[in-house]
Image (cartoon, rainbow, N blue to C red):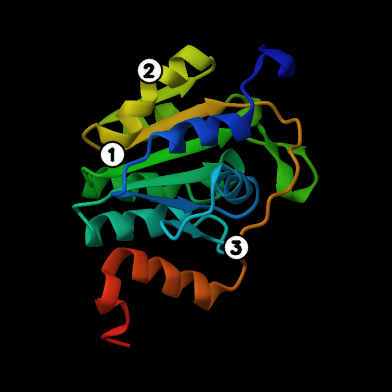
Amino acid sequence: MTLQAELLNRRRVVKRILRDRRDDVLAVTSLGNPTFDAAAAGDTPRNFYLWGAMGGAVMVGLGLALAQPQKRVVVFVGDGEMMMGLGSLATVGVDKPLNLSVVVIDNGYYAETGMQLAHAGRGVDIAAIARAAGFERTSTIHAQQELEDYVDVLLSAKGPVLAAIKVSAKPEPTCLPPRDGPWLRSRFREALLGRDAHASQ
């Protein structure tokens, strides 16, 4: 078993992935740590933070990827959220969006509800589940060099792609992005559609 001290730092992982993002890369983040980590990497209108709807982040990302095929959509989720929305992997595997990547920030615990040991912490292999569901590429990442080698896959390779990244459960300072849902929706629409963002509203 890998010691916590040897695991990757989740905040640095998210920052590294987003460091090389192009203007066409959109980020969808699940509630809790993935949202805090994406905000810490730099708040931008191209981030769509989900403050609720636990288990729904991958489906939001799928809808966005299908609606915006010219964009790259990267969904950041915790392993607990991913298990709650496990059926979404099957739907993604069937629809096979070429422009969707899922990044599972896997600390093996339910951080939002009191650090109970989660399924991934008990041996469930999320990357293997995604592979069986029909994802084009999957990987379980334990080390920095493995992450470096996979960043371009997440941002550019034919999808759907999933990376389950093993990170330490050590807490990081909370970094809160804006929490006004309607405002976040409007900001994101404007980043996508420009002047046409509110034409149909």
Per the image, label 3 sits on a secondary structure element best described as: loop
Q: Is residue 185 visible?
A: yes
| Residue drawn where x is 27% and y is 69% of the image | 193
Taking 185 as reference, is 94 left or right? left
Farthest residue to the right: give it: 114
Mark number, residue 160: 1
Image location (x, y in percent) of residue 50: 54, 61
Mark closer to the chain start, 3 or 1: 3
Q: Amino acid at mark 3?
A: Trp
Mark number, residue 149: 2
Q: Quadrant of residue 93?
A: top left
Image location (x, y in percent) of residue 35: 58, 51
Per the image, label 2 sits on a secondary structure element best described as: helix
Q: Quadrant of the N terminus?
A: top right
Q: Which residue is mark 3?
A: 51
Q: Residues within 10 Å of mark 3 (few under 14, many from 20)?
A: some
The CA distance from mark 3 to mark 1 is 24 Å
Image location (x, y in percent) of residue 42: 54, 47
The CA distance from mark 3 to mark 2 is 31 Å
| Residue drawn where x is 19% and y is 54% of the image | 69
Is 56 above or below relative to 131? below
Q: Amino acid at mark 2?
A: Asp
Q: Amino acid at mark 1?
A: Pro
Mark closer to the chain start, 2 or 1: 2
Taking 45 as reference, is 93 left or right? left
Q: Are marks 3 and 1 in contact (CB under 8 Å)?
A: no
Is 101 above or below relative to 136? below
The CA distance from mark 2 to mark 1 is 17 Å
The answer to which of 32 and 122 lies nearer the viewer is 32
Per the image, label 1 sits on a secondary structure element best described as: loop
